[in-house]
Image (cartoon, rainbow, N blue to C red):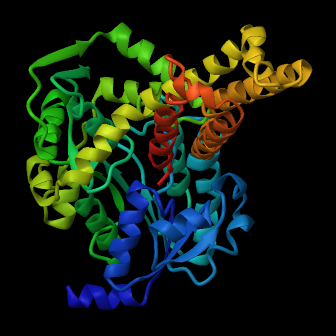
Amino acid sequence: MIARQLRLANKNILVLGAYGFIGSAVARSLGAEGAQVSAFVRNKETAAQVLLDAAHIQGDLRACLRPEDWSGPLTGIDCVVNCAGALQDGPADDLEAVHHTAIAALGQACAKLGIAVVQISAIGADPGAETDFMRTKAAGDEALRGCDAPLWVLKPGLVIGQTDYGGTALLRMLAAVPFVQPIAHPQAPVQCVGMPDVCEAVIRAIAGDLPQGTYDLVEDKPAPLSEVLSETRRWLGFPSARLTLDVPVWGAHLISRCADALGRLGWRSPLRSNAMVIMAKGVVGNPEPYRAASGRSIAPLRQVYASLNSSREHRLSARMSLLMPLVVAVLSLFWVLSGLFGLFGLTRASAVLTDVGWDANLAKMSVLFWSAMDILLGLAILWRPWAARVCIAQFCVAVFYLIGASLAVPALWLDPLGPLTKILPVMMLSLVAWPMLQKR
């Protein structure tokens, strides 16, 4: 162990996708081993929140499509660990660029400079795969193999970590459903891997303790998805489900299509079609090559969960992930309907102001303006890049309504329908949604 730390202490490592689910864990593990870690990140503000001790290099894989684009980030680097990836094309994601073109350019640049590459790929990455996720991952793997840079291609199974993202987040979200356990493809075979084993494989490769090659990082035996979900529910401390609801194939297809549509608005749901296709086929690899090369086996799922701490914040996060789509939908519906009611009930709404002395035209203009504002806020929260900030805007507008109406029409507080009283829970719901919509 000391010898390995001495070897790593002289290494300058560049981690791509460094504030992601796998990337952040790999960067911290390398730092703990004494390596000098530089994080290649798209957003420095997010990186500062997630990675406190790594140097931050701002960049976008979508803009690093030629070998010369990598000359700056690779200065002084001994090894690159590519943990970057995206599940599906979207407003902020380009699978061909991120998984293939940029990585091919990286490989060429690394080969010229004599820099080693550790590629985090995926089980099922194959040129003939059904999903563009797997096909582009396979294309990136092959491009790296065509270069002369020292190369390790690691293919993790379903990664289980202390934090959650992607498949892990989906497991926890489904496990949080009370009383009933919904599941699609319950018999799909799945082999998991704990995050510590993924990080250990990366460290072994960089330290020279793992021969170059391609390795599946998976536990010895697959388990049906239903069992993996049951283990996740048990680890979180949720009661066993009283009823299992098997989602039919057509139901899973409909859900994934809806998630794809939301993906066009920037929502990176783990229920999109690529994830559903992958889960339907199962996540199965061959553990033998890695065991033979490293002399160790990947820990089984139950052992992985036994090593992880489960506490109140994990249960809260799972429940909030489950509720978040509903919260956003309710907020959007409330604000849009509020605006439409104002427009369609213009005469009645403006009469509330004219009855306390407002000019008729001014009253109508005010109702029209704020009705349009309501509709705008209701629609804007559906655009993922704006959603968190829109929650704050909704709260501020609601506060303005509350104060303005209290001063202009205080009698509304005594209205039997309670129009002002109802603003209070909406304000609180916007505040609750705001942290739920933080990206990391």
In the image: residue 331, left or right of residue 70: left
Q: In the image, is residue 242 above or below residue 421?
A: above
| Residue 275 in which image quadrant | top left
Quadrant including the N terminus = bottom left
At 59% from the left edge and 84% from the top edge, which residue is drawn?
A: 76
**How many tags in the picture?**
0
Can residue 79 be seen by looking at this rendering?
A: yes
At 45% from the left edge and 56% from the top edge, which residue is drawn?
A: 20
In the image: residue 38, left or right of residue 291: right
> What is the x, y in percent for residue 49?
49, 67
- Judging depth in this view, the residue of 149 and 304 nearest the camera is 304
Q: In the image, is residue 162 above or below residue 186?
A: below
- Judging depth in this view, the residue of 191 and 180 nearest the camera is 180
| Residue 209 in which image quadrant | bottom left
| Residue 158 in which image quadrant | top left
> What is the x, y in percent for residue 83?
46, 58
At 64% from the left edge and 49% from the top edge, which residue is drawn?
A: 101
- Judging depth in this view, the residue of 245 and 102 nearest the camera is 245
> What is the x, y in percent for residue 60?
66, 58
At 13% from the left edge and 46% from the top edge, which residue is drawn?
A: 235
In the image: residue 50, left or right of residue 26: right
> What is the x, y in percent for residue 147?
56, 61
Can residue 96 be seen by looking at this rendering?
A: no
- Judging depth in this view, the residue of 97 and 358 nearest the camera is 358
